[in-house]
Amino acid sequence: MENFIFQNPTKLIFGKGMIAQLAKEVPAGKRVLVTFGGGSVRKNGVYEQVKEALKGFDVVEFWGIESNPKIETLREAIKLGKEQKVDFLLAVGGGSVIDGTKLIAAGILYDGDAWELVLQGGCKHALPLAAVLTIPATGSEMNNGAVISCKATEEKFPFYSNNPVFSILDPTVTFTLPKWQVACGIADTFVHVMEQYMTTPGQSRLMDRWAEGIIHSLIEIAPDIIENQHDYDRMADFMLCATMGLNHFIGMGVCEDWATHMIGHELTALHGLTHGATLAIVMPGLWRTLKAEKMAKLVQFGERIWGITEGDDNARADLAIEKTEAFFRSLGLPTRLGEAGIGEETILEIERRFNARKVAFGENQNVTGAVARQILENCK
Amino acid sequence: MENFIFQNPTKLIFGKGMIAQLAKEVPAGKRVLVTFGGGSVRKNGVYEQVKEALKGFDVVEFWGIESNPKIETLREAIKLGKEQKVDFLLAVGGGSVIDGTKLIAAGILYDGDAWELVLQGGCKHALPLAAVLTIPATGSEMNNGAVISCKATEEKFPFYSNNPVFSILDPTVTFTLPKWQVACGIADTFVHVMEQYMTTPGQSRLMDRWAEGIIHSLIEIAPDIIENQHDYDRMADFMLCATMGLNHFIGMGVCEDWATHMIGHELTALHGLTHGATLAIVMPGLWRTLKAEKMAKLVQFGERIWGITEGDDNARADLAIEKTEAFFRSLGLPTRLGEAGIGEETILEIERRFNARKVAFGENQNVTGAVARQILENCK
């Protein structure tokens, strides 16, 4: 096991009716910037519940943080926050709204252009923020990460700041999510777990078991929730899995991969494809490409998750990859670049970008531009 | 899933050589009361590492917090802390030292006698504390609980305060633990997990999987670490399991039992038997007694942990209990009252105490004095 430092101070407030707790949790005397996405919260009752709970608070609203939040939009929110001298932020929405709000919280305290913070990858100071989550997927509600895009340059980069002070998760708000978002949320959670699991074997048996525990749960609930989104206990399971998939609870003392994400971000930046959908395409291709170095873990995964106990290691690994790809397909997601209308040109552009940035990803830091290209060729 | 609120702010600093981090983590300018047990830290190098890291800090030492920390001893430490005007505490030891220090941290800010705080079950104010853990077992290093004993009255009660600000866990310090303490630590961790798991089925599939993940890990590593305590990765697995077993990570949205603990505390209070050893006796007896109400979960546990897939539910539950008892025996622990020299008189005294206190424990709040007596009869 590697040495590690773990801390996750976010207060998780989970369950039916919990949005009302905002009245107790938002610190008194603050001027609060409440941030929203495109308006679905007006239809599903979340906006009304938030408004009701914040009666008597000093509130400024900002609407319109889009999926894959764009710096162009966030600059407007930062301008508003500075003008209005807000000192607390509340993100009401999915991972994109929470991610965007993490940058807003830093940008309000920064004199330069906030895109500089994104390029630096982090910030020194940020206002406190909290969240009301509406889409289980990114884990942003209980971690310090964000991913911010730039429309002008078609780029998308990670940015790190503070954890939300608290996050409220009411599974009933997921009942009306579009099926596509549920499917992408499941894929996103699945791949978050794999980025922390499908690496070197034998690092931590507990972290392996916990990662496998999230995957077992996702596989069990997926058919039900794709059919019936109104099953409270299933949606609660899903929502908890998504949060626990990326809050460092399964990453203690183990190395991490994240190459699938870095390649997936490029597909979103260049084609606007939903994050979870990019991952369902890239991860099986990455496993096919790096099968030799991930062999032992693929075999363990195949046995514990898919019950594969026959054949040699190579055959088992192949079957584990096939079954994982089939799982993503069962969610209604594309798993090949062609299905998403992505061709050779994009593959070459991603190779070019990785080379130009002189980056290499993965637990062995060997996913260079050339390897990313091989991976994408294996996603055709 | 039940609604829940989860927050665990403790910073976990884990790995070889991490005790040196004290120099960075203890807040500058504080007057620190460092608390110790009986002196084993002088032999295993921990004391030297702590002293080295705290060079330049303003430090007062208190020695002699015993197993099952006694209010009689803690009063002395509280007196010293008040006299010396300390404002930060560092517990260096096992769960007993950390538990005792939680009460000291509260007692220093309390005008009355600290036993009053224990009888109240909690406190309004407490000084910040941190820990260097030397025995994996209680989880006290990452939770807000403590259990405090009174020599005079032969009583032992839980007390709740704050989490440690940070806790340092270096698995190498466990290499020289007595075998008995390793065995009791494994049993303690096992039963902590079961108190949060062996209740109503179907509450949270993820929490079930995570609880089972700790148990799988314990069962896998137990034979190795009983044989060879110098295997770093195994001891690291054990240490992480013990902390994760009782920091609320596996208790989100599920009901809890704790009747085994409440009965076990009485056995310790009356006979001085080590905590983990009391649990290995009581839990199988409690399962035998409450088999009907725990049936569905016993069957799930039997299948997922012990691979029991044949026979009717009753036979499976019986076998799951047998295998669990055999596991405790494989650690060298007694699993029956007689082996620990405990007889009928103690059973009657525990029934009398529960009745006098008008308490009932367990997820269904039905473990009254009479039921506790039945359970103990089933531990003979």
Image: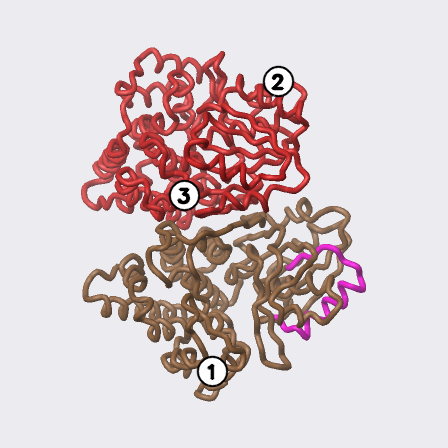
Chain colours: A brown, B red
Name the element at disc 2: loop
Mark 1 surroundings: few (<14), some (14-19) or many (≥20) residues within 10 A: some
Name the spot of residue A199 as percent of width and height, x first: 37, 63
Whole-angstrom CA distance, mark 1 to mark 2, is 70 Å
Q: Is residue B10 magenta?
A: no
Pointer 3 or 2: first along the chain: 2
Mark 3 surroundings: few (<14), some (14-19) or many (≥20) residues within 10 A: many
Q: Residue furthest bottom?
A: A345
Report which residue position mark 2 lands on.
B113
Left of B172 or right of it: where is A8? right
Give the vertical position of B65 relative to B248 (above or below): above
Front in this rendered view, residue B364 or A211: A211
State the extent of the magenta-drawn residues as a range. Answer: A69-91
Corner quadrant of residue B371:
top left
Report which residue position mark 1 lands on.
A351
Report which residue position mark 3 lands on.
B171
